[in-house]
């Protein structure tokens, strides 16, 4: 009887909030029996077929920025004599981009890093998303070519590590390179040369590439452990745009071809 009285007194002392919590707990305890049996959905196309009237006030704010962006993207940088297509083991597109990177790297080092002397450059084929068109080359084309915010990085590598780096490029069927040449035989680099001389395992070489590759992207983990590294903060795309704009101002057109820098040695 004493036990019952204790329980009774406790129950009569429940507050409304406690009662609500108990009610919610009961409801939740039965949720495990609920089962989704049907899902209805509708695709909404976010394109010109979507009939939405823009808000005039918002449009008045956006219009100046949209107009400036469109004008900037349509600006002509220079011209190209031919469409530059990508491919492996080498291609006009990868050769041109790698040559440009090596040339610009020299300029960057001369101004900011006088102790760095870059020997070779590398641009991954997968990072170049579209060809460079024949005729006028616009800013928009560079954004389509390089849609990523990659930056220029310098890496100082031993000859042994450079050989391993070349082997990985060979395994991938070739990449965009400049300042070096090598054959591909049985998935490995064959007769690699740096600046026209045989690769020397006892020497060190400076490589310029993107932070994506330097951080181990595309399977290049061997580069992610290189200790001698210079992160320039210079964007690949900005460097290309400035370089092509100067070419246009000088009346120089883009020209590129394959020259055997990466070849099948079978």
Image (spheres, grey):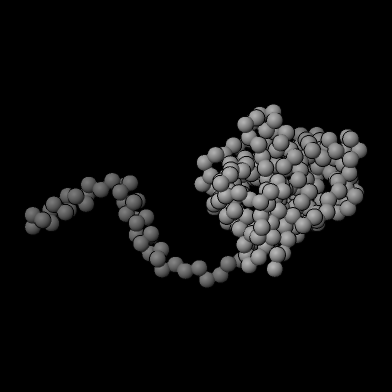
Residue 114, given in percent of the width and then of the height, sits at 65, 30
State whether residue 35 is above or below residue 203: below
Q: In the displayed structure, does residue 124 sit left or right of residue 253?
A: left
Residue placed most toward the observer, 11 or 180: 180
Comparing 185 with 22, the one in front is 185
Q: Nearer the viewer, residue 168 or 133?
A: 168
Residue 243 locus on image (x, y percent): 79, 38
Give the residue drawn at x 88%, y 38%. 248
Residue 83 seen from this side: yes
Q: Report the residue at 61% width, 43% height from top.
A: 205
- The image quadrant that residue 110 belongs to is top right
Count every numbered label the image shows and give the total: 0
- At x 88%, y 34%, the residue is 249
Q: Dividing the image into 4 quarters, which one contains the N terminus?
A: bottom left
Relative side of 105 to 68, left or right: left
Residue pictured at 72% horizontal, 48% vertical: 196
Q: Position of residue 144 (x, y in %)?
A: 76, 49
Extreme residue in the left direction: 2
């Amino acid at each position: 009887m004493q036990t019952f009285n204790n329980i009774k007194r406790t129950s009569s002392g429940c507050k409304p909030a406690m009662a609500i919590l108990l009610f919610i707990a009961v409801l939740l305890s039965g949720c495990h029996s609920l089962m989704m049996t049907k899902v209805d959905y509708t695709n909404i196309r976010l394109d010109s077929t979507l009939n939405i009237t823009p808000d005039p006030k918002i449009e008045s704010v956006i219009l100046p920025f949209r107009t400036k962006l469109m004008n900037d993207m349509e600006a002509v940088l220079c011209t190209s004599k031919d469409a530059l297509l990508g491919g492996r083991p080498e291609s006009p597109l990868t050769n041109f981009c790698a040559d440009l990177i090596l040339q610009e790297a020299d300029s960057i080092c001369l101004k900011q890093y006088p102790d760095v002397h870059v020997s070779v450059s590398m641009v991954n084929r997968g990072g170049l998303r579209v060809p460079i068109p024949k005729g006028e080359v616009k800013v928009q084309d560079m954004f389509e070519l390089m849609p990523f915010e990659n930056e220029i990085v310098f890496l100082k590598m031993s000859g042994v590590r450079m050989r391993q780096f070349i082997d990985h490029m060979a395994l991938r069927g070739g990449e965009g390179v400049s300042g070096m040449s090598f054959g591909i035989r049985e998935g490995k680099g064959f007769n690699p040369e740096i600046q026209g001389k045989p690769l020397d395992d006892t020497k060190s070489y400076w490589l310029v590439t993107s932070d994506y590759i330097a951080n181990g992207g595309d399977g290049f983990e061997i580069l992610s452990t290189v200790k001698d590294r210079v992160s320039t903060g210079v964007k690949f795309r900005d460097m290309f745009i400035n370089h092509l704009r100067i070419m246009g101002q000088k009346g120089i057109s883009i020209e590129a071809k394959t020259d055997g820098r990466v070849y099948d040695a079978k």
